[in-house]
Amino acid sequence: MAPQRTTLLSPTELAYLYTSLSLSPPLRPDARLPTTFRPLNAETDLLPSANGSARLCFADGMEGIVGVKAEVERTKGVGPGTGVRGHKREGEDVSMSGTGLDKDELVVENKTGEHDWVEVTVDMPGQRDDDSMVIFLAQMIHEGLVADEALSKRLCINGRWHWKIYIDILLLSPPATYPLPLISLSTHLALLSTRLPAPVSTGEEDPLFNDDWDAALPLYPSGNGKQSENTTVSKPPVTLLVISVGDNIFFDPSREELSVADAVVAVTLTSSSQSGPKVLAIRTIDPPSRLSSSSSAALGDELGFGEDDKEKEGTWKPRRGGMKRNVLKKMVGMCVKPGGVGEEVLSGLEGFA
């Protein structure tokens, strides 16, 4: 887990905040409901030289821009009798004279992609490119994208060529809280607006495309166009930041709420027209209270906590131990159930595209 800034709240203030979030019903500092996200403004198609782009701004001033660029690349490991990944078809005789490729010998029915077909970079003010937070956030976005089989199939042109997409994420201001929700939502919108040139070539020919940008095809087709009944319309993955405080679950936590969280989880979701939201990846994140000795052990020494681990009245101490299974089950259930948070977020973001 990458380090992040902790809030400058006293132990008494942290205790009051933890108690408020543990109530039934809970009371959040900004009066939001547990499943309510912060207000945001978003726009798409703002970078004319990119295949897709989006800008998103939260009410607290956090702002980010995402650009998506695509280029054609030759697929590695393709040879006679091989598919996109270079696997031989079972029971096929691949003996051929010469080294040329015959399009009839290429297996492209089950098109699958490789992890290097998607490249994600994150740029944050005041952070180096090799900083742990930058690398961690880029890896989390990349993890959800490569786990989405629908994306890898769309990037495959034929048995010998594929699209490679570059996703560049730029935060315009230092993050006031953990920037994962901002990065994930803006990336989702950028991919929704991404369009690729319409192909003119067919089969295993070298790819040729239509020069007319108005004829470009969306990377993620919407369900509003003419689709056949058997066509599956999917959406880009989105990563939700979820925390638990006591027995309560909260989505899109603020900086103050993260400082008293018992557990922090990043849940990556996607959905399609034939099925509801489904989980692509789950990552647990260390809460800020456990990231340094000054916020946990040092705080306990200051308050006089000993081996008996007893808390003083009116003060707060970071919880120790892992997350309970029923809490994780409740988090995932709230994300994937019909009409739940995941479905609401995905349908709401589609309105910006």
Image: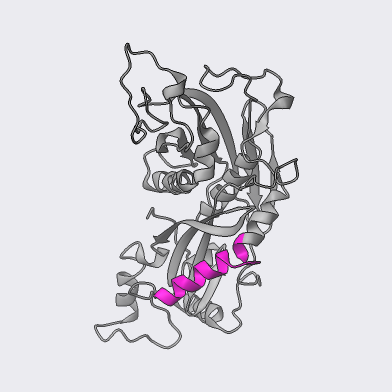
Residue 104 position within the rendered picture, expressed as x and y whole percent measured from the top left: 46, 22
Residue 159 visible in the picture: yes
Relative height, residue 282 to residue 165 (above, below): below
Q: Position of residue 135 (x, y in %)?
A: 40, 44
Image quadrant in which you'd find residue 218? top right
Front position in the image: 322 or 255: 322
Q: Residue placed at 65% from the left, 72% from the top?
A: 33
The C terminus - image quarter = top right
- Above or below, 56 relative to 295: above
Stretch in magenta: 325-342
* Residue in view at x 60 percent, y 19 percent: 201
Q: Residue at x 49, y 59 (%)?
A: 267
Camera-nearest residue between 58 and 163: 163
Is residue 63 visible in the rendered image? The answer is no
- The N terminus lies in quadrant: bottom left
The part of the image, by quadrant, that contains residue 50 is top right
